Amino acid sequence: MWPPSELSEADFRHLHRHLRAKAPGGASPRGALDAITAEQVLAAVREVRTGRTVSLAAPVDTHSGPDNADPARHRLTAPADGEPGTSGLEFARDRFAMNIHGDVDSHLDALCHVVYDGTLHGGVPAAQALSPDGASALSVGLARDGIVGRGVLLDIPRLHGVPWLEPGTQVRAEDLAAAEARQGVRAGRGDILLVRVGHRRRREELGAWDVSGARAGLHPTALEFLAEREVAVLGGDGNNDTAPSAVRGVDFPVHVLAVHAMGLHLLDHLRFEDLTPICAQEGRWSFLCVIAPLRLPAATGSPVNPLAIL
């Protein structure tokens, strides 16, 4: 039995070793992506009934704010001064740049994103794999052919009858199991598990806040639920970690456990507000999910626009 709220660093290290040994992606160079087989992809395709598609990404935010100190930058580079001519041929062109691992924009974390005790997932020495030119191992290039599988959405605020979880709220394994029972769905091997805490809705209705000090997310021990179910990918509408951290001395314990120990690619800062009412109306919380990161062979992550296909 784990302590009810805060874990000591020793407890956390024990949990890390336990999950690394237990999780199906704990030793694989591709991590938990190996749990998605061709047969499971075909089964996920059979989830499609209406052909409706829904984006799970938030609009890219180019405005600075308390949670967006380094916003994405977009500008028109042609026509000059944004003034198109009145005759002849011209092309409108633009340039885009972003901090992939910010606290607002939807993105995928690669297995090289988390360095813990000087190593990456699978014990790869970080000093050998990371350089100013990028990652030579475990980059987002592992997902270059896309991640396609059965998506399962668990709506934790819906379980508790609230629009969102207040910042600092910790989602535990029993919450995930209770949401499954309430929604009539069960996550399993190779699934893309999506956990809604209502972060995005709260931000849209109340405005941005400093998420480094307070945000809802998973308690580290909830990762045992994911290991038991052998899920392949974890995504959330926050960054999956709670703040303040539930582990003394480790600021992002869910990232460490999911990416470093279990080999899970993480989807941070998604948006489920278009999907949840459809799932509730249709009475089903599973669907075909397609995630296509950019072809960035040496990058630690990628912006993404995941799609739920119902």
Image: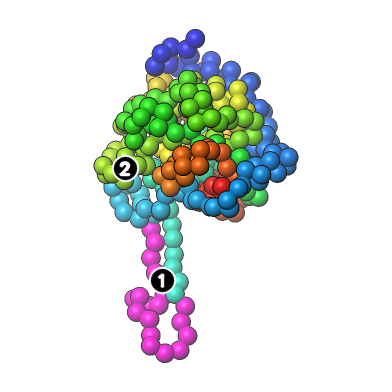
Q: Residues within 10 Å of mark 2 (few under 14, many from 20)?
A: some
Mark 2: secondary structure: helix
Q: Residues within 10 Å of mark 1 (few under 14, many from 20)?
A: few
Q: Which residues are magenta?
A: 73-91
57 left or right of 226 in image: left
Residue 12: % across, % down:
48, 18
Magenta stretch: includes residue 280:
no
Residue 54: % across, % down:
50, 50
Query: Is residue 198 or residue 141 the one in the foreground?
Result: 198
| Residue located beneath label 1 in the image | 77
- C-alpha separation, residue under disc 2 versus residue under disc 1: 31 Å
Visible residue check, residue 299: no
Mark 1: secondary structure: strand
Query: Is residue 41 or residue 291 the one in the foreground?
Result: 41
The amino acid pointed to by label 2 is Arg
44 left or right of 102 in image: right
96 left or right of 145 in image: left
| Residue located beneath label 2 in the image | 203
Look at 38% across and 37% down and name the residue there.
Answer: 198
Visible residue check, residue 225: yes
Mark 2 or 1, nearer chain start? 1
